[in-house]
């Protein structure tokens, strides 16, 4: 499980450098990512370099996930629950990247605070808290979608 206990400023510095390089690339892809939602043919017709955007987006996403996982370990359910929560907060079918990122960051921060204060004298790994809170959220979303008749 992912854990934020015992992290130092060295990890923060490494993550800050990775964010300084990869975040502008990811945000710069935002305009083209919206055209890709229309389909490859329409996006290419609108002037989007489809293959280049897909490769750049893939490499930037893998880089961001790799640095985050290297620093904290795998934190359960954040990548699954945060976009779903952000979608409900933003009120759109596909939430903006910034809203999803901030939702995930606040979820991890809240889970870390809860993990540190839940049992006095003990610091739980943050992955246990996100797993314990994320699983019911995803189950609730699945039940809600199936009741609406739009489930798979």
Image (spheres, grey):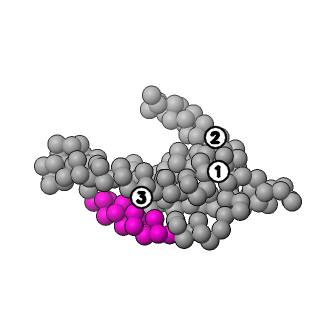
Q: Secondary structure at mark 2?
A: helix
Q: Which mark is residue 135?
A: 2
Residue 56: x %, y % from top left:
30, 54
Q: Which mark is residue 2?
A: 1
On whether residue 136 falls in the magenta region, the answer is no
The quarter of the rendered structure image containing the C terminus is top left
Sooner in the amino-acid sequence: mark 3 or mark 1: 1
Sooner in the amino-acid sequence: mark 2 or mark 3: 3
Q: CA distance from mark 3 to mark 1?
A: 23 Å
Residue that lies at the very extreme toward the right in this rendered image: 121
Residue 112: x %, y % from top left:
69, 59
Q: Which mark is residue 97?
A: 3
- Residue displayed at 54% across by 71% down: 13
Q: Secondary structure at mark 1?
A: loop
- Residue displayed at 56% across by 60% down: 105
Sooner in the amino-acid sequence: mark 2 or mark 1: 1
Q: Which residues are magenta?
A: 16-31
């Amino acid at each position: 499980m992912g854990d934020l206990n015992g992290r130092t400023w060295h990890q923060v510095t490494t993550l800050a450098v990775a964010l300084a390089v990869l975040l502008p690339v990811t945000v710069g892809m935002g305009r083209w990512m919206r055209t890709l939602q229309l389909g490859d043919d329409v996006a290419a017709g609108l002037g989007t370099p489809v293959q280049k955007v897909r490769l750049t987006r893939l490499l930037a996403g893998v880089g961001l996930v790799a640095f985050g996982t290297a620093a904290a370990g795998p934190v359960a359910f954040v990548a699954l629950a945060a976009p779903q929560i952000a979608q409900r907060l933003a009120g759109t079918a596909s939430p903006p990247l910034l809203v999803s990122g901030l939702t995930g960051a606040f979820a991890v921060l809240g889970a870390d605070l809860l993990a540190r204060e839940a049992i006095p004298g003990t610091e739980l790994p943050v992955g246990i808290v996100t797993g314990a809170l994320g699983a019911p959220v995803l189950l609730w979303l699945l039940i809600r979608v199936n009741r609406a008749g739009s489930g798979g």
